Image: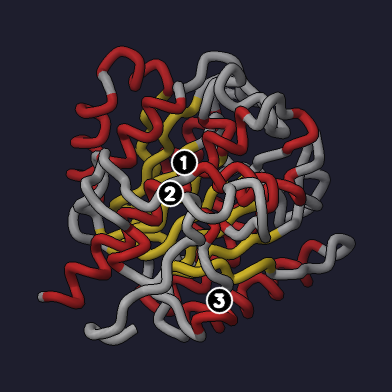
């Protein structure tokens, strides 16, 4: 979008009720209606990489439905993200549910095409397997990227049943492939039992720092956000958010819930504290609506994606006006 063009924003909810019409993210226009976008919101309905409860293939559309409640002005960041940059819903990346390797390749190719237009990606999963091809694509454009990984789990295990590509292995693969900046890697919100202490040892060797959910409880969102900002610096940053970083009280609709997690308020405040970071793309994954109640999980996920989109839109507008 050029500097003199006005972005096309969401449907006016004062004229058309929020519950009417197509469920694009935040009621934004489709990508084919605007031609190109600064931020493309895309779904990846894939959950063949899960190790416990399936259903995240339906997560993207559940997040879109919940996002009908979002409004165009974000007071927490003092920004109107859909007026600052063109944000559009790019629909879904359709992938083979029976062949993980083929699905990973398809996601990477589709992400390459979208990033090639100049857009940043706000991806709605899907299970966490999809983070690997998305990171591959982002790294082609930016080089090895800093990573903030919000999750109850490490997702740096080696294989499951001999499979290299699963929702528990993407970040080990990403480190092995050299697409992450190992000076700026952090897990946030981890907790719960592990297979053994070696899991933590291996993770540390890969370069990951860990901020547990207990750390967030004791130290607070502002201090944690400050620590993460210092670790990231001005590097290009990718944020990957497994919704199970939240406590099951705040996100019951997910495949591998763990007790003792963050509140949705803590997650949103940490993200707002990262608004000065160079966020180049992000994902929100593992929403499984079959286990949800009253859209608790999808509402939390839609607000999470909204904060991430706001950060990207503000940075795009600032760069355009510099």
Asked where in the image residue 249 lies, by quadrant, the reply is: top right
Q: Which residue, given by chain and number where applicable, does mark 2 sit on?
A: 306
Q: CA distance from mark 1 to mark 3?
A: 21 Å
- Quadrant for the C terminus, please: bottom left
Q: Nearer the viewer, residue 45 or 52?
A: 45
Q: Residue at x 60, y 42 (%)?
A: 66
Q: Residue at x 43, y 22 (%)?
A: 213
Q: Secondary structure at mark 2?
A: helix
Between discs 1 and 3, the one toward the N terminus: 3
Q: Residue at x 72, y 38 (%)?
A: 288
Q: CA distance from mark 3 to mark 2?
A: 17 Å
| Above/below status of 76 relative to 310 | above
Q: Secondary structure at mark 1?
A: helix
Mark 2 Cα shell of 10 Å, populated few (<14), some (14-19), many (≥20): many
Q: Residue furthest left?
A: 322
Query: Is 197 displayed left or right of 7 in the figure?
Result: right
Q: Looking at the image, how many numbered discs can be counted on the residues?
A: 3
Q: Which residue, given by chain and number where applicable, does mark 1 sit on?
A: 303
Is residue 21 in sight in this rendering?
yes
Asked if labels 2 and 1 touch by Cβ distance under 8 angstroms, the answer is: yes
Relative image position of residue 153 (x, y in whole percent): 57, 33
Q: Which residue, given by chain and number where applicable, does mark 3 sit on?
A: 31
């Amino acid at each position: 979008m050029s500097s003199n063009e006005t972005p096309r924003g969401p449907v006016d909810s004062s004229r058309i009720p929020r519950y009417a019409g197509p469920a694009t993210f935040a009621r934004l226009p489709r990508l084919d209606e605007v031609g190109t976008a600064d931020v493309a919101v895309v779904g990846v309905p894939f959950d063949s990489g899960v190790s416990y409860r399936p259903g995240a293939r339906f997560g993207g559309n559940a997040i879109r439905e919940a996002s009908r409640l979002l409004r165009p002005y974000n007071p927490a960041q003092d920004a109107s993200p859909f007026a600052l940059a063109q944000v559009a819903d790019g629909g879904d990346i359709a992938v083979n549910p029976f062949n993980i390797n083929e699905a990973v390749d398809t996601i990477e190719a589709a992400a390459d095409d979208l990033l090639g237009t100049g857009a940043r990606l706000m991806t709605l999963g899907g299970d966490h397997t999809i983070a690997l091809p998305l990171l591959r694509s982002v790294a082609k454009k930016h080089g090895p990227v800093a990573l903030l990984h919000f999750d109850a789990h490490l997702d740096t295990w080696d294989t499951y049943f001999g499979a290299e590509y699963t929702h528990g292995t993407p970040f080990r693969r990403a480190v092995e492939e050299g697409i992450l900046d190992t000076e700026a890697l952090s897990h946030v919100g981890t907790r719960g039992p592990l297979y053994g202490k070696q899991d933590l040892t291996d993770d540390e060797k890969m370069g990951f720092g860990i901020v547990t959910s207990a750390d967030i409880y004791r130290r607070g969102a502002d201090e944690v956000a400050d620590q993460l900002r210092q670790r990231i610096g001005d590097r290009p940053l990718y944020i990957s958010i497994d919704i199970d970083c939240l406590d099951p009280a705040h996100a019951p609709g997910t495949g591998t819930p763990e007790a003792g997690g963050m509140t949705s308020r803590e997650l949103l405040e940490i993200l707002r504290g990262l608004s000065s970071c160079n966020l180049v793309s992000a994902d929100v994954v593992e929403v499984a609506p079959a286990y949800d109640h009253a859209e608790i999980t999808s509402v939390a996920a839609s607000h999470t994606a909204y904060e991430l989109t706001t950060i990207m839109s503000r940075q795009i507008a600032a760069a355009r006006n510099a």
